[in-house]
Image (cartoon, rainbow, N blue to C red):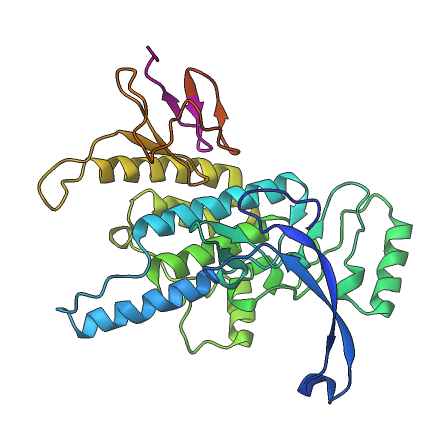
């Protein structure tokens, strides 16, 4: 965790010791270690989905109910993009997460998604341990060490049956020990099904054993999300591209990030030109970067009004800025009006 630094990966601050005395320790004092991480006051993405799921069911039974959904379609797309950006970074550093699911995505007080629970992360960089000694027993560790010694050039060996069955890929359900980072792409695709449908990605009565057998055989697949149920038609291609049965056919997180950046940009443009409640049109007087910073564009050399951030004077930590333009994380270049 100490090697990963990204705005959409939870920050790790260190380890602390604490004496615990409760039912789990049978009344005895026991020293335990705890990880200190960034505060995410919004809870988990799964919590957000469950709250929205309840409201969705309520509105079906009470059509005239004016209760608003706790999350918007724009939130869904933004979080999807942020998770993809964080995972693209994790993969670029040579790591595999291996347990991507809504429970392992936190939401901070800026309403941004943070990838967490990095205890199952596998380091696949050259020179890294070739097996997960902290996740297996000592006898299996000795066996794997002997295999590695006999074939030093062999690829890293992956721990079998690691992850959450609902989000595990076909190759993981086959108990393969040579899977790649494509398992994260599959899990992310299942997460998108859960997020955009606000329902379970598989039949609710399916068992873990059935998941293992039938996903491995490609006989059971996540629900097919309909284009009309998505805020943008191109999201269908992203979801389908994540859920290809063969790992080699799946999209990469870099590709996903680029596609979602374009989708989010188009949705924002549609939102800005959408008539407001009083019939007025929204204007393009500001732009928002991926870190949530809102830049007000001064017109005709005017200074930003009180309470607004002037784009010339604000340096976002996640965007490159010069005196003439700003480039957002999604690659969009915003040209600034000349300052008089």
Residue at 30% across / 36% down in the picture? 266
**Residue 260 in view here:** yes
Q: Nearer the viewer, residue 39 or 182?
A: 39
Residue at 31% across / 61% down in the picture? 70
Q: Where is residue 123 in the image (x, y as percent from the top left)?
A: 72, 48
- Residue placed furthest toward the top: 340
- Residue placed furthest toward the left: 279
Q: Nearer the viewer, residue 280 or 333?
A: 280
Q: Position of residue 21 (x, y in %)?
A: 72, 82
Q: Position of residue 321 (x, y in %)?
A: 48, 23
Along the horizontal axis of the image, is 132 left or right of 253? right
Residue at 26% across / 15% down in the picture? 300
- Quarter occupied by residue 278: top left
Give the dominant element type of the magenta stretch: helix, strand or loop.
loop
Q: Position of residue 272 (x, y in %)?
A: 23, 36
- Residue placed furthest toward the front: 306
Along the horizontal axis of the image, is 32 left or right of 332? right
The segment highlighted magenta reads: 326-340
Decide whether residue 23 is among the magenta residues: no
**Residue 340 drawn above or below residue 86:** above
Residue at 14% across / 43% down in the picture? 276
Quadrant location of the C terminus?
top left
Tag count = 0
Q: Nearer the viewer, residue 184 or 292?
A: 292
Decide whether residue 339 is among the magenta residues: yes
**Residue 179 in view here:** no
């Amino acid at each position: 965790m100490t090697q990963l630094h990204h705005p959409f990966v939870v920050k790790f601050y260190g380890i602390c010791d604490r004496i615990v005395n409760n039912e789990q320790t049978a009344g005895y004092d026991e020293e335990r270690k705890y990880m200190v991480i960034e505060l995410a006051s919004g809870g988990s993405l799964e919590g957000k989905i469950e709250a929205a799921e309840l409201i969705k069911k309520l509105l079906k039974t009470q059509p005239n109910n004016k209760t608003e959904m706790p999350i918007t379609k724009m939130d869904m797309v933004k979080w999807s993009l942020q998770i993809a950006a964080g995972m693209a970074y994790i993969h670029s550093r040579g790591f595999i997460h291996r347990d991507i699911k809504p429970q392992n995505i936190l939401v901070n007080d800026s309403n941004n998604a943070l990838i967490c629970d990095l205890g199952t992360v596998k380091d696949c960089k050259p020179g890294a341990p070739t097996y997960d000694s902290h996740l297996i027993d000592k006898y299996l560790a000795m066996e794997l060490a002997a295999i590695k010694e006999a074939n030093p050039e062999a690829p890293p060996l992956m721990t079998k049956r690691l992850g959450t069955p609902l989000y595990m890929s076909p190759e993981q359900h086959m108990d393969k020990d040579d899977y790649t980072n494509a398992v994260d792409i599959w899990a992310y695709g299942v997460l998108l099904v859960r997020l955009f449908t606000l329902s379970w990605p598989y039949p609710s009565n399916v068992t873990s054993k059935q998941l293992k057998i039938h996903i491995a055989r490609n006989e059971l697949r996540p629900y097919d999300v309909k284009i009309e149920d998505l805020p943008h038609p191109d999201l269908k291609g992203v979801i389908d591209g994540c859920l290809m049965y063969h790992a080699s056919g799946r999209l990469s997180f870099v590709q996903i990030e680029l596609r979602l950046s374009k989708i989010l940009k188009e949705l924002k443009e549609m939102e800005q030109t959408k008539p407001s409640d009083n019939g007025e049109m929204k204007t393009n007087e500001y732009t928002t970067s991926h870190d949530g910073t809102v830049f007000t564009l001064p017109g005709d050399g005017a200074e930003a009004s009180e309470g607004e951030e002037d784009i010339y004077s604000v340096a976002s930590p996640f965007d490159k800025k010069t005196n003439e333009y700003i480039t957002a994380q999604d690659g969009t270049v915003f040209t600034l009006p000349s300052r008089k």
